[in-house]
Image (cartoon, grey):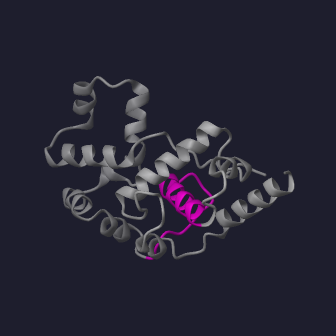
Amino acid sequence: MKQLKLVPTSHDCAYVITEFIKLRLNNKSIEQFFEEKQYTESTKKAYMYPFQEKEFNLFNESINGIKHLKQNSYDFLKSKYDKGFVLGDDRNNICLKNVWLVGYLNENYSKNNKIEILLNAGFAGTKNASNVIMYVGKSTGLYFNLLSTNGIPTNKFNDFYSNDMSLLKDRITNAVKSVKVNL
C-alpha cells in the first residue's frame, strides 16, 4: 500500500501557537524568541511547522486574525474552512489530517493498537512516526477544541470534518482487516 506521508514534524501545537500569538501581539519576531530561548535548529523547525502556509499560514495572518485565533480557536479555524475540512491527497493540512486520524481511531478502534493501524494503513513508516501522528493530532485537536482531553471527538469535530473522509477511512478499514487476517 502506497504511503500517504501524514507525519508532521513533532510539536505541541497548543504550546507553539500560544507562544506565537504572544510574540505577534507584542510585536516580537520569532527569531528574537528563538534567540532568547537558544533553541536548536531542529527545535526551531518543529516550532515553526504549524505556522507555514501549507498548515495554518500564521506567518501571513493579520493582527486581527491572530486576536481572533486567541479568542476562539475553533471559530478561527471555521473561518478558514467555511465549508468544513476537505480532504486532499497531498502534503497540506497534515496537522488537521492527524486530528481526524486520532479522533476517528479513538472513537472507532479504542481497543485496537492505533500505532499498528497507522503503520499498516501506510500513514507512517515507523512506530515513532505513528506516535508523532498521535501526539500532534491530539495536541492540535485539543487546541482547536476538536478533541476532548482523552482524544475523543467533540461535536465540533463532527461539524468540522463533515465532508468525505473515505480516503482515510478506507485505508484504516483495510489495515484493520489485514491485521485480523494475519493473526
Residue 28 visible in the shown view: yes
Q: For the image shown, how many numbered marks are present on the structure?
A: 0
Residue in the picture at 15% in, 43% down = 27
Q: Residue, x 63% and y 62% (percent of image)?
A: 109
Q: Is residue 102 left or right of residue 120?
A: left
Q: Looking at the image, which is closer to me, 152 or 159? A: 152
104 falls in the magenta region: yes
- Residue 54 seen: no
Q: Is residue 74 magenta?
A: no
Which residue is pictured at 53% across the width and 69% down the height? 86
Residue 110: % across, % down = 60, 60
| x and y percentages locating residue 65 in the rendered image | 24, 61
Q: Which residues are magenta?
A: 83-107
Residue 160 occupies quadrant: bottom left
Above or below: residue 47 compared with residue 80: above
Nearest to the observer: residue 134 or residue 64: 134
Q: Residue at x 57, y 51 (%)?
A: 91
In the depicted view, which residue is nearer to us: 107 or 96? 107
Question: Residue 103 in the image: x percent, y percent?
Answer: 52, 62
